[in-house]
Amino acid sequence: MLLEINPRHPEPRKIGQALAVLERGGLIAYPTDTVYGLGCDLMNKQAIERLYVVKNMQKNKSLAFICHDLSDIAKYAVVDNWAYRILKHNLPGPYTFILPATREVPKMVLSKQKTVGIRVPDHPVVTTLARELGRPIISSTAAPPGEDAMIDPSEIDDRFKLDLVLDGGVCGMTPTTVVDLSEGQVQIVREGAGPIDDLVA
């Protein structure tokens, strides 16, 4: 189902509709500051399993945590002072930061390295959703395996078996820059929408 939403000032009623879908274990698509994402409630194991199936992803492929702001991160990732300065300088923004995971992270989405990818997008729709949900949204790019990110909400609705697509207009095609901070230094895993020159504390 497609639901048009104001990308800058999301209507509370429509956010409420999306929350209801997430809380009952549904899958949704939403605009971010980079590409459209597909996601579900972090604490719903069946929904996460379904997300892997819908995306045709192997279970060893990591999913990102969308947090509503910096204060939400420390519950799920170990953030020392050095890493915090980098996060504060660059978030919200088009980055996924890999950090050591805390015990709060469900085993199903924990990497072998016991790390977690954290996102705080600069986009009111998805950050409002995460804030109202009260926990992160587990997220993956709206892209079929081996293909570019899909930019058209109606095509996303047609391609994936989702419960709701929040249509915030056309998004970009370039995914986040992925940065590994888990070993005490800045390691660029993937260059994307976020400039790597800015990755300083």
Image (tube, grey):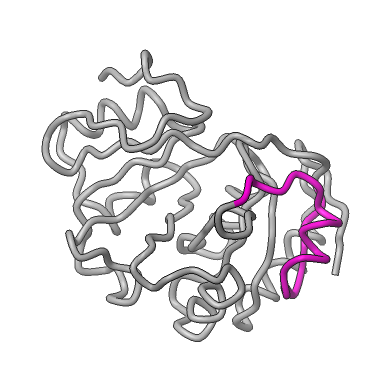
Q: Is residue 108 magenta?
A: no
Look at the image and tell me in which quarter the N terminus lies: bottom right
Picture quadrant where residue 17 is located: bottom right
Left or right position of 147 against 191: right
Residue placed most toward the observer, 149 or 193 = 149
Query: Where is residue 160 shown, x and y percent of the image?
Result: 72, 69
Query: Residue, x 51% and y 73% (percent of image)?
Result: 52
Seen as rendered, the residue at the extreme front is 146
Range of residues picked out in magenta:
147-167
Query: Where is residue 48 shown, x and y percent of the image?
Result: 49, 76
Up/down of 97 relative to 90, above or below: below
Query: Residue, x 69% and y 60% (percent of image)?
Result: 29
Q: Does the magenta stretch include residue 158?
A: yes
Up/down of 140 relative to 16, above or below: above
Left or right position of 72 against 122: left
Picture quadrant where residue 159 is located: bottom right
Query: Residue, x 45% and y 83% (percent of image)?
Result: 45
Look at the image and tell me in which quarter the C terminus lies: top left
Question: In this figure, what is the number of numbered marks?
Answer: 0
Residue placed most toward the observer, 146 or 176 = 146
